[in-house]
Amino acid sequence: MSINHHLDDATLVSYSAGALSQGMALVVASHLSICPQCRKRAEVNDSVGGALLESLEAETVADGMLASILTRLDDMPVQLTEVSTDTAVIDPEIPSPLRDYIDRPLDDLEWKRIVPGVAYYDMPWEGHGVSRLLRIAPGKAMLAHTHNGNELTMVLRGSFSDEVGRFRRGDVADLDDQIEHQPLVDSKEDCICLIATDAPLRFTTLFGKLVQPITGF
Ligand SMILES: [Zn+2]
């Protein structure tokens, strides 16, 4: 797989610092799991951050707090779950960090339709912004929108094009609030993306504004 669109430095630094929303961190982790190039950059960030942390750590974790956490862990009932890697179905289309939340092939998910040709599947948590899989049929465009914050999109299947370029499997679109774009699916099959924002999208068309309250984007 050749990856042409990567994560921004700013996004990687925020990820290393643990400053991203859960959804955005999942997109970053998913891309890192298949992109050696970004993984290398993330490792460099981590080693710089780790050196900084080491000098702080001794002061920030109080002994008493650690002891009380350990006691509480001892008190918790132990649940044993049998995980057999032999029988687990590993779908190569789903990056490993995403497998914690998606337990079946993408086609078997309960997709919710927004408009004909556009469906979504929400990640199972709530928080700021959006975190979901988006599935768009060939030839369809996503609604034109800008962002109040950042938007991260990773292609899992198919491809789309927008003002920035063409995005195929593994590529990430790492967009800030300066960009208005309207991704158009240009593959023969549906395009499925993992998408996360740290704030709601801002639609720029009348139709987008009308459906926004319904779709929750
Ligand atoms: Zn990359």
Image (cartoon, rainbow, N blue to C red):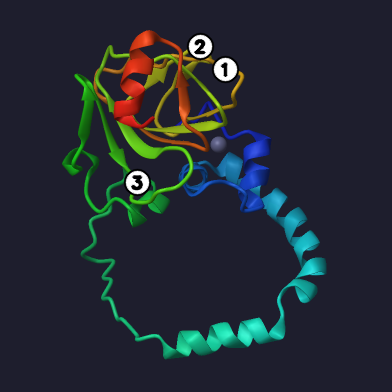
Q: Is residue 93 above or below residue 125?
A: above
Tell me if mark 3 has few (under 14), some (14-19) or many (20+) residues whose alpha carbon lies within 10 angstroms of its own: some
Q: Position of residue 41 (x, y in %)?
A: 66, 44
Dot 2 corresponds to which residue?
163
The N terminus is located in which quarter? Answer: top left
Q: Position of residue 117 (x, y in %)?
A: 22, 20
- For the residue pair 32 and 75, the one nearer the viewer reads as 75
Q: Give the number of callouts.
A: 3
Residue 192 visible? The answer is no
Asked if the residue at tag 1 contacts the one at tag 2, i.e. Cβ–Cβ closer than 8 Å, the answer is yes
Write the residue at 61% across / 19% down.
178
Dot 1 corresponds to which residue?
179
Q: Which mark's residue is nearer the viewer, 2 or 1?
A: 1
Disc 1 residue type?
Ile
Q: Quadrant of ligand 1?
A: top right
Closer to the chain start, of discs 1 and 3, is: 3
Q: Position of residue 18 (x, y in %)?
A: 61, 53
Q: CA distance from mark 1 to mark 3?
A: 25 Å
Q: Secondary structure at mark 1?
A: loop
